[in-house]
Image (cartoon, rainbow, N blue to C red):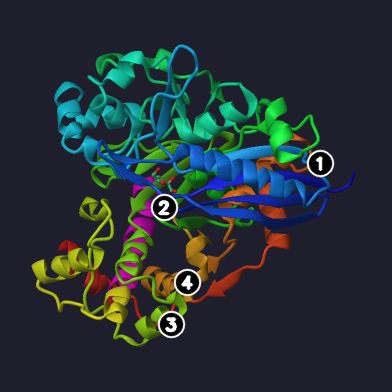
Amino acid sequence: RAVHAYAAVDLGASSGRVMVGRVGPDSLELTEAHRFPNRPMRVPEGLRWDILALYAGVLDGLRAAGAHCDGRLDSVGIDSWAVDYGLLDADGALLGNPVHYRDSRTEGIAEKVWATLPAEELYAATGLQYAPFNTLYQLVAARSTDQLAHARRLLLVPDLLSYWLTGEQGTELTNASTTQLIDPRTRDWSHEVASRLGIDLGLFAPLRQPGDPAGVLRADVLEETGLKGPVPVTAVGSHDTASAVAAVPAGGSQRFAYISTGTWSLAGLELAAPVLTEESRAANFTNELGLDGTVRYLRNIMGLWLLQECVRAWGEPELGALLLDAAEVPALRSVVDAGDEAFLAPGRMPERIAEACRASGQPVPASPAEITRCILDSLALAHRRAVEDAQRLADQPVDVVHIVGGGTRNALLCQLTADACGLPVVAGPTEAAALGNVLVQARAHGLVGDLPAMRRLLIRTQPLTRYEPRGDTARWHEAQVRLTGR
Ligand code: LFR
């Protein structure tokens, strides 16, 4: 067959989707087969992922995907958010629902870790940003739990679902790099960090590279989904951000920054080697691992989570109308630090944003339109800072900013980002993570070439929108000084 069909399972913090990617020698088409909600649950112990509901969504999605290709899928790949995991006992049974990275159990844990292993040394060894939810801190937080005592295996979320589909266990590298237990220079486990913190690396299944085979769908999965076997599962960049960055449609000679937008904004550069300097640590940049030896040098920004939480608090008003109203609100009246950990937990978001404005002596936004404007200005400002800091810290200037992911649908955010950065923005594709997922599968099966070839195919096939920077960047600089003092 000239055209092959791949299923990309892409799980986000608020919804999951299964997409069918059809890849030919010079074609790439993506169709959504199934979308389902991802609803975290607050139980007495804390905030948990409903992993069986997600697995059900994956199975429903594979069945729906089969309907698009006569039941014949060439392969399946899975990506999701990072850092979270399930623990298995000696029989291979899951020990409880995976803990949500926004759960409060990691509060105060980092300070304890740094008392044993100073933050400077930890950064020099792993290159990972400080985020309270890094797997390392989660494991330290879980140290004296019954569950961890009984655990014989730890599988990151995509690896856990892949295990249920195939019966085979592995740890995919791009996602493993978010655990803070990987040395980005060797791209292998850091035994030193693990042993100093008493973390048993034997819990992890062997590392897999994106593109490695990861088993075949088990007989009962074939029966449940109606797919015709054998269907291989292929390891992809199983961290959604790794898949999204692989699908940045940058031309070969282009010097680019990227912003992967969705619940989070992940803004930074693709590098050939990690930046492990003290300055980089102080700026809280992370060195996560990407495809083909690349490093995702980026900063986590709270992203559209801020808006999603407000919209939830306001009883889900229509987003299009809200954004139109926000566009009419005067720009940059008040801004908040969209990188602030204070916005990590769910709940009361409009109030928390208003409080942050009040505390910094700025006008307090009140209406949904004003708060929305404050959020979008703040995000654009955070994008600007991240893109500027990354260029300086990595000594790699850029000419263009690529925005991929869900935020590309938000034209106002794209335009404000162009304005704030003083650089052209190319927006698209929206389903970058799913496309990166599909392309790595296609490449593993010999259909596409290297990363530049994957990107050329995206440029030829995906609709992209260009935003030119408007006006002067001085206003943005002024807002940044207002917020950060520099
Ligand atoms: C985006 C993302 C980020 C990661 C955060 C938590 O979906 O994967 O890259 O920092 O979720 O896992």
Residue 52 placement (x, y as % from top left)? 49, 37
Residue wearing tag 2: 266
Among numbered discs 3 and 1, the one appearing first in the sequence: 1
Give SS at disc 3: helix
303 falls in the magenta region? no
Among numbered discs 2 and 4, the one appearing first in the sequence: 2
Residue wearing tag 3: 321
* Residue projecting furthest to the right: 1
Q: Mark number for residue 446?
A: none
Q: Residue at point 39% right, 34% down?
A: 98
Amino acid at the residue labelled 2: Leu
Q: Check contact, mark 2 vs mark 1: CB within 8 A.
A: no
Query: What whole-number distance in Å separates the C-alpha atoms at marks 4 and 1?
Result: 35 Å
Label 2 CA crowd tier, 10 Å (few <14, some 14–19, many 20+):
many
Query: What whole-number distance in Å separates the C-alpha atoms at marks 3 and 2?
Result: 26 Å
Q: What stretch is highlighted in magenta?
A: 374-396
Among numbered discs 3 and 2, the one appearing first in the sequence: 2
Residue 189 placement (x, y as % from top left)? 42, 20
Amino acid at the residue labelled 3: Ala
388 falls in the magenta region? yes
Query: What whole-number distance in Å separates the C-alpha atoms at marks 2 and 4?
Result: 16 Å
Q: In this view, does 10 lie to the left or right of 283?
A: right
Residue wearing tag 1: 72
